[in-house]
């Protein structure tokens, strides 16, 4: 019997015993489906995080009072005791960081933005003029805030696409005045549309000079400092210079921990990678249980098949089939049975991932390596758990097998 004939017999067996075959494949289907679904979501989130959430650029780092990623309650309590960062700290870094090409700062608040009778609750960002260039932000129209605007605390602003859509649906907003916290601000620029992150809009914002922001919401708020190194290779040196400057200003002892946080793109992505890998490992463990259960069920069904086909095995041996031929036949049948379960699991897992990504903001990305892994693992399960039934069939005595009723 050749390979294709063994596969054909396995498929005919599946067709002849549909209900038994479906129940046999449940464990493998669930295991492979779980792996494909989770890998699709994790891959989609990895791409999403890298492109939209932590896309600072390879030569940019941030300095914040509190770490932007807190992984324990103790870290949260410790971070709340830290001193604020102020514009003086930004100026100190600007003067001492020789590896920094540009240094800026921002601070945030929320307020109602009004134009006529229309209004929206939006995030109000106070920026120094360097920040948009450091972050590589783009404009759809107009200009960004300038050094002159910051120095003279001018009432000018740049707005996001959501404010344009809701407050100025039929007119050009450039040059118009909006009310932010009951103060008039002239619109000088419009940000390019950025879309949303997990259902949260990235276009509902207004940017004003940090000087006027601090007049409205107090200068005692902690700022976030942005710094851009001369190039990617000098990023680590720039971070070290900024760290030394802040530690000296805060009079920290040599062996004391930093009471501020410095992060770059790689730090954020590494933290996210650790989280996603841990989640993936747990999921793989759960899926492995399903695959083992499915493999045991496949083995039991193959043992039943050997018993049902004992006389057939005897006839084949009497006709000249070798032990090796019988072994290969049942291994191919077991692997084919599991492979069919793997294919069903891949189809269901991919369908679930695509459906969820369509119906919710959760992104998904189906990877070909995950599909290949699903096929290889399901086939491997069939081969491994099919060894015992195949060996039992190959070792049958042809005389005893022919007498079997």
Image (spheres, rainbow, N blue to C red):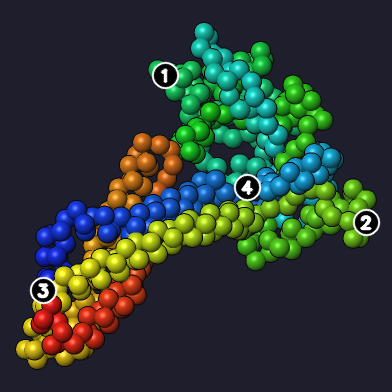
Q: Nearer the viewer, residue 86 or 301?
A: 301
Residue pointed to by mark 3: 405
In the displayed orientation, state which residue is furthest to the left: 319
Figure quadrant of the N terminus: bottom left
Mark 2 or 1, nearer chain start: 1
- Between marks 2 and 1, how big is the CA–CA gap? 56 Å
Examine the rendered structure and indicate whether residue 339 appears above or below residue 37.
below
- Between marks 2 and 4, how big is the CA–CA gap? 31 Å
Q: Nearer the viewer, mark 1 or mark 3?
A: 3
The residue sitting at 68% across, 48% down in the picture is: 71
- Between marks 1 and 3, how big is the CA–CA gap? 84 Å
Q: Nearer the viewer, mark 2 or mark 1?
A: 2
- Between marks 4 and 3, how big is the CA–CA gap? 82 Å
Residue 253 has which mark?
2
Residue pointed to by mark 4: 134
Mark 2 or 3, nearer chain start: 2
Figure quadrant of the C terminus: bottom left
The residue sitting at 67% across, 38% down in the picture is: 129
């Amino acid at each position: 019997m050749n390979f294709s004939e063994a596969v054909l017999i396995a498929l005919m067996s599946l067709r002849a015993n549909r209900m038994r075959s479906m129940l046999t494949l449940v464990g493998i289907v669930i295991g492979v489906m779980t792996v494909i679904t989770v890998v699709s979501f994790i891959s989609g989130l990895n791409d999403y995080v890298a492109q939209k959430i932590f896309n600072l650029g390879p030569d940019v780092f941030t300095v914040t009072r509190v770490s932007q990623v807190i992984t324990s309650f103790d870290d949260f309590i410790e971070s709340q005791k830290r001193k604020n960062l102020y514009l003086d700290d930004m100026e100190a870094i600007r003067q001492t960081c020789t590896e920094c090409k540009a240094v800026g700062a921002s601070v945030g608040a929320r307020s109602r933005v009004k134009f006529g009778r229309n209004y929206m609750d939006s995030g109000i960002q106070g920026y120094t003029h360097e920040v948009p260039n450091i972050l590589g932000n783009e404009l759809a129209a107009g200009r960004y805030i300038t050094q002159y605007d910051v120095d003279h605390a001018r009432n000018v602003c740049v707005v996001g696409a959501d404010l344009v859509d809701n407050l100025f649906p039929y007119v050009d907003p450039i040059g118009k005045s909006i009310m932010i916290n009951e103060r008039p601000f002239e619109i000088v620029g419009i940000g390019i549309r950025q879309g949303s992150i997990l259902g949260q809009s990235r276009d509902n914002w207004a940017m004003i000079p940090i000087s006027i922001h601090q007049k409205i919401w107090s200068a005692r708020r902690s700022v976030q400092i942005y710094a851009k190194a001369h190039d990617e290779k000098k990023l680590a040196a720039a971070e070290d210079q900024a760290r030394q400057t802040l530690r000296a200003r805060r009079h920290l002892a040599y062996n004391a921990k930093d009471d501020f946080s410095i992060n770059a793109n790689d730090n954020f992505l590494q933290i996210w990678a650790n989280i996603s890998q841990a989640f993936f490992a747990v999921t793989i463990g759960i899926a492995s249980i399903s695959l083992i259960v499915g493999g045991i069920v496949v083995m039991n069904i193959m043992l039943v098949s050997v018993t049902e086909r004992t006389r057939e095995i005897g006839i084949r041996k009497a006709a000249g089939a070798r032990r090796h031929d019988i072994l290969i036949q049942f291994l191919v049948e077991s692997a084919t049975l599991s492979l069919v379960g793997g294919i069903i699991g891949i189809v269901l897992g991919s369908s679930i991932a695509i459906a969820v990504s369509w119906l919710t903001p959760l992104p998904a990305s189906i990877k070909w390596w995950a599909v290949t892994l699903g096929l290889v693992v399901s086939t491997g399960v069939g081969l491994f758990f099919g060894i015992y039934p195949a060996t039992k069939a190959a070792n049958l005595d042809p005389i005893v097998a022919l007498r079997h009723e």
